[in-house]
Image: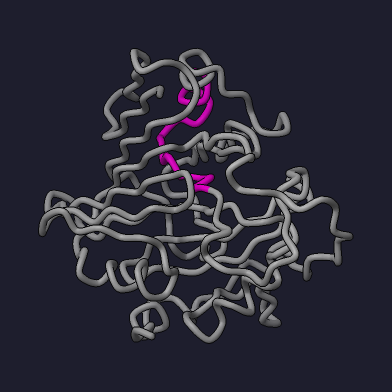
Amino acid sequence: MIDSSLTRRSFMNTSVASLIAAMHAPAIALAQESDPETEPLALIQRLRLSSNDLNLQEPFYRDVLEFPTERPNAETLIVTAGQSTIEFVLDKTVVNPFYHVAFTIPENRVEQSLEWMTPRWDVLDMTKEGGKIMDFAHWNAHSIFYLDPVGNILEFIGHHDMAYRTSDPFNPKQVLYASEIGLVVPDVPTSVAKLNEQFGLENFRGLSSSGFTAMGDTRGLLLVVRKGRGWLPINTVKSDVFPVEATIGNGSAADTLTIDGLPYTIKGA
């Protein structure tokens, strides 16, 4: 196991807003088990994200999360998370870039993912009392959060509206895909309208606000966030703009959206 002191030094002493409520996922009766190969295709098929230190990240994704990794050259780290590929690219033009990325796991294995992660890496507290499983009641989902060594805010999430479940002990091969990426913008409603028009992405569960709107469905979500808004669960870490290239399963390869003045490129597959 590699040393997680970087995450502890920077983040573990921060407090979470008292209004965040967390609870342990309820026991869910097992229906027919799911095969990842029969699940719907990922919305987020590929991400290209900036990094200042690939050498710190590589052992985390390879040895802690046990994802397949490649280093085709000194400036690129490729991580495979189920159906999705994340390409971290060494980028010295931005300082301390960080992102929010979630990974979908079987809907009945959130508690086991916590048990699996706990001896490996720091899992973030969701409450002052130390509760670590977040109940997204309005999404019918539960999740845990953790940081990679350079400060990316990562999440294992189980959507209970999905049939994806298993009776096997949790392991990283159950990760279905990367299912969330944060897009930080100055004007959420304007960016949401552009994504809806170009790719037909709807507001998840019809919810929207001027500070945050999730676009997509349980296959994957683009989280459109107002710049400067605190990132859950570390509200002291404010959202900021860093380069993102995303290939998504909506639209065609000819569809490309750039958001005015921002280093984002969203492509259809």
Q: Is residue 204 left or right of residue 118?
A: right
Name the residue at 41% across, 63% down: 67
200, above or below 45, in the image: above
Name the residue at 31% across, 29% down: 265
Name the residue at 46% across, 17% down: 251
Q: Which scheme is used to colour this image of the protein?
A: one colour
Residue situated furthest right in the rendering: 29
Q: Is residue 123 left or right of residue 268?
A: right
Task: Choose between 240 and 37: the one closer to the eye.
Answer: 37
Provide the residue span drawn in magenta.
177-193
Report x, y in % for residue 32.
82, 50
For the C terminus, which image quadrant? Answer: top left
Report x, y in % for residue 257.
35, 20
Q: Is residue 49 magenta?
A: no
Q: Is residue 82 left or right of residue 213?
A: left
Across the whole image, how many numbered discs are drawn on residues? 0
Task: Choose between 78 and 102: the one closer to the eye.
Answer: 78
Report x, y in % for residue 188.
50, 31
Report x, y in % for residue 63.
37, 75
For the N terminus, which image quadrant? Answer: bottom left
Where on the picture, by quarter, is residue 241?
top left
Name the residue at 85% across, 58% down: 30
Where on the picture, by quarter, is residue 15?
bottom right
Q: Is residue 56 left or right of residue 226?
A: left
47, above or below 52, in the image: above
